[in-house]
Image (cartoon, grey):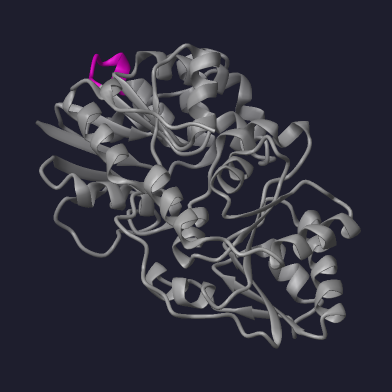
Amino acid sequence: MRIALFTPFSPEIGGGSVQLRSHLEQLADLDVEWYYLAKKPAPGGGHRHWLGEPLTPNQFLSDLSARTRFLPGSKNHIRELVGRMEADLYWVVAHYEGISVAAELIDLGKKVHLTVHDDPFGTWIRSGRYRAFRPLLEGTFPGVLRAAQSIDVTSWGMRNWYRQRYGVKCFSLYRHVAKLPKLSISPDQSRLTIGHIGTLYHPEPFRRFLSASKKIAAQSQRGLRVIRIGASPEIDAIAAQDPEIFQAYGDLTEEHAIPVLAECDFMYAMYPAGKRYALFRKTSLPIKVSTYLQAQRPIFAHTPADSSLACVVGKYGVGRVCESARVDGIVGQIRNLLGELVPAEHYEIARGDLMGLAQVQQLGAALRGEDWERFPESDC
């Protein structure tokens, strides 16, 4: 059976590609051709096929308008992309152009398996450009979900929400990690070292967290260092005010990032509070969490308790959840975290549940058209 995997991003860039590559390594028996949109072709060829640059926002808007008849538009760009793929099953990441690609394939009567890494209603609320697309999305996305042959989603929270909201069967699927690395690295006791990967979803909670960290470091007569891996414009602005605190490593492979993070006292992760971000934080689970778990250092989850991040950290006891937006409240939770020791087996249990082989086997069953519901489910 030939499978065409479509992504609106490069196979070499971003958390979504990391997740997909981890699955494909375990499903080598499947005949998968990867088709993608990106500014330029990714290194390597073989089973990877560059379809060109991403659609412009106006082209994407035109396609969704034509599908919903909300406004005049054209499906021509998406139809041209779909016409360049030929397979028995189409595996589509339902993100940006992927939503339109899946809709077109379904209209053509093709079999589609959907992967949803980010709920578009939750993610696009943070974008001034795409927030206006909501009426068009409401006319397209639910129908795509209900017509798909099978669906995997990135978290338990998203799985439960899609079952409740759309009445569809789906299963949660995070990235695969076969085993935790063996590490013999300890933090420098003369400093309070905090690690962070990637972007911030909102800068203000991090500013207050940084103020709290300065207080803790001063009270314990330790230096403060914040290790940055990857890019974040929000952190750039904050780091410019305290350049001596921040140490930026840029983009690192996971192999090189894990030893750097293992030198930290703990890692920082956050989701914003408030109704506007509620769906986003309840359904999303950033790929950085998988790297944090592999570094086997505690996670400071700066987030409301209803988030998927809080669920993982709380369920497996791999750090502390801090809901406070006040500096004094954050100080107290940092103290609690520093005063605790996370048992090594907690990281391994989290790896097994979130990133173990069973979930990849479930994906394989779905792609083959087999009974994927026979696999046991986890939940918070």
Position of the N terminus by quadrant: top left
Residue 172 spot, x, y in % from top left: 41, 33
Q: Residue furthest bottom?
A: 190
Q: Nearer the viewer, residue 124 or 203?
A: 203
Residue 11 falls in image quadrant: bottom left
Q: Nearer the viewer, residue 230 or 310?
A: 310
Residue 191 spot, x, y in % from top left: 70, 84
Does residue 130 appear anywhere in the picture?
no
Please report the residue visible at 66 percent of the width from the left and 33 percent of the height from the top.
131
Residue 80 spot, x, y in % from top left: 29, 32
Does residue 148 appear anywhere in the picture?
yes
In the image, residue 143 lies in the stretch drawn in magenta:
no
Position of the C terminus by quadrant: top right
Please report the residue visible at 51 percent of the width from the left and 74 percent of the height from the top.
262
Q: Give left or right: position of 325 versus 160.
A: right
Specify the segment rendered in magenta: 105-111
Q: Give left or right: position of 281 versus 295.
A: right
Q: Is residue 180 above or below residue 156?
A: below
Please report the residue visible at 70 percent of the width from the left and 36 percent of the height from the top.
277
Q: Give left or right: position of 100 versus 292.
A: left
Please report the residue visible at 32 percent of the width from the left and 38 percent of the height from the top.
359
In the image, residue 107 lies in the stretch drawn in magenta:
yes
Q: Is residue 202 above or below residue 245?
A: above
